[in-house]
Image (tube, rainbow, N blue to C red):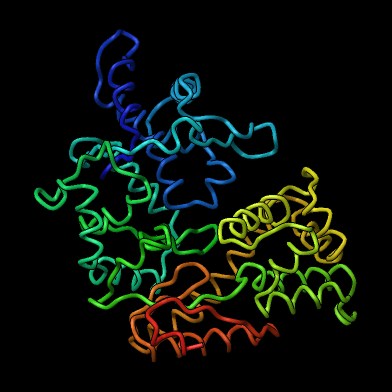
Amino acid sequence: MNFILQNEVYYKILNEVRTPTGRISEPLYHKYFYILHYLNRCRLFDAEEYAIGVPMYYPVLEEILMLKPSKVSKILKWFVTHKIIKKVKNHSNGFSSSLYKLHTSIENKPIDFNSISASESRLVKKIGWFHNRSNYECKITDHQRDLIGNSLTISEDGKRYLFKKYPDLEVDQEVNYSAVDTKDYYLIMIYLNEKYCRRAESTRRIYSSVTSMPGHLRKHLLLNELPLFHIDLKNAQILLSVPLIIEEYRRLHGKNLILPDDILIFKSLAENGNFYEYVAYKAGIDINTPQKRDDFKKSFYKHIWYSKIKSWKSKLKTSFLEEFPNVWNAINSIKKDDYRTFAVNLQKFEAEIFIDNVVAKLYESNISALSIHDSIVTTSINDLYLAESLLQRALSKYGLKPAFKIEGNDELNIAS
């Protein structure tokens, strides 16, 4: 396996970490490497979890690293003291472990790879066992893993993009890893045929080399030697939240109660794909450029969607509460025991629709397709039509009438 490390931290560990008797120890280095690798891996592949903070469960770390609690604590303390990682939540805040992230001075540093085989390290065997244990296995995931492993390649344009930035890659099938931009990590790994696909037990989402890749780089991918085309829901996370919010409202106020106007308006805006524009207008926030719209969406999810109930106030939050009081109360009711519950339930519902329903039916029809959370990737216009039809049918069962976005070449713009 490849440990994903920041180059300067790799050398700091080699130069400073020693056994209690002052000896150099390769197995000890590997234990330090793993902590940094695990945080980097979460940042690269499980962005939602990383945004909240990565839990470092002592019983799990003791088992994987084969160390006593005091030794695990010493390793974490070393990283914190050297400002390589930072603690973002204490165990005392109600979590089953403290939460960590990479230190801000380290997050965007170029990454390095340190390859270690199971024959070289008992730790690698332990890591493989632990990661497999935390996966949710199913036939859909197996099929998608096979597609990514056997049929996903890089286009000639993609190769030119990589070779221009990393010339060693074209000549030696290697790269000066200490200079790799983290955004290019997934593309390089696919080129080197080191691909990734797993389904999380907690959210049922499929995370892969494709889901984690920046959207603008997916244009360089081929599936069965064909370019990828996407069908996305407009305002997807907002639309998918509607059934959860209605269900919670009716649980609180009665199943047969007529839905209030603010929930009906919320639903209509989500279906039409105009939600963000409406909320921004009401809050007096300009989102007339792509960057401003992107910043607004990040602020919305941070302050309202995935925040704690008693979080900070803002102009956006105040405006949202005035426009959608019953939506806000329903969301907070779902969050009352753990503010992460709403996000997890939303991701599970998304996975049910996109993976267990739509992708499963596409595979039954022998269609090559991939899921990217709230979008479906296919390689032909007819398959795109079918994916759209399946999504409409699945969401209609919840009373939703979705709007779609199409990404691909010009001929596919007529598909929606």
- Which of the pair 80/71 is nearer the observer? 80
Left or right for 375, reference 41 = right
The total of numbered circles placed on residues is 0
Residue 298 lies, in percent from the top left, at: 62, 54
Dividing the picture into quadrants, the one containing residue 146 is bottom left
Left or right for 230, reference 125 = right
- Which of the pair 377/2 is nearer the observer? 377
In the image, what residue occupies the spot 21% across and 40% down?
Answer: 176
Left or right for 46, reference 368 = right
In the image, what residue occupies the spot 57% across and 30% down?
Answer: 87
Quadrant (top left, top right, bottom left, bottom right) of the N terminus: top left
In the image, what residue occupies the spot 35% across and 10% down?
Answer: 20
Residue 2 lies, in percent from the top left, at: 27, 43
In the image, what residue occupies the spot 78% across and 49% down?
Answer: 309
Residue 394 lies, in percent from the top left, at: 58, 85
Q: Is residue 360 above or below residue 415?
A: above
Dividing the picture into quadrants, the one containing residue 260 is bottom right
Residue 181 lies, in percent from the top left, at: 34, 44
Residue furthest toward the top? 21
Q: Is residue 335 above or below residue 123?
A: below
Dividing the picture into quadrants, the one containing residue 38 is top left
Left or right for 45, reference 233 = left
- Which of the pair 4/135 is nearer the observer? 4
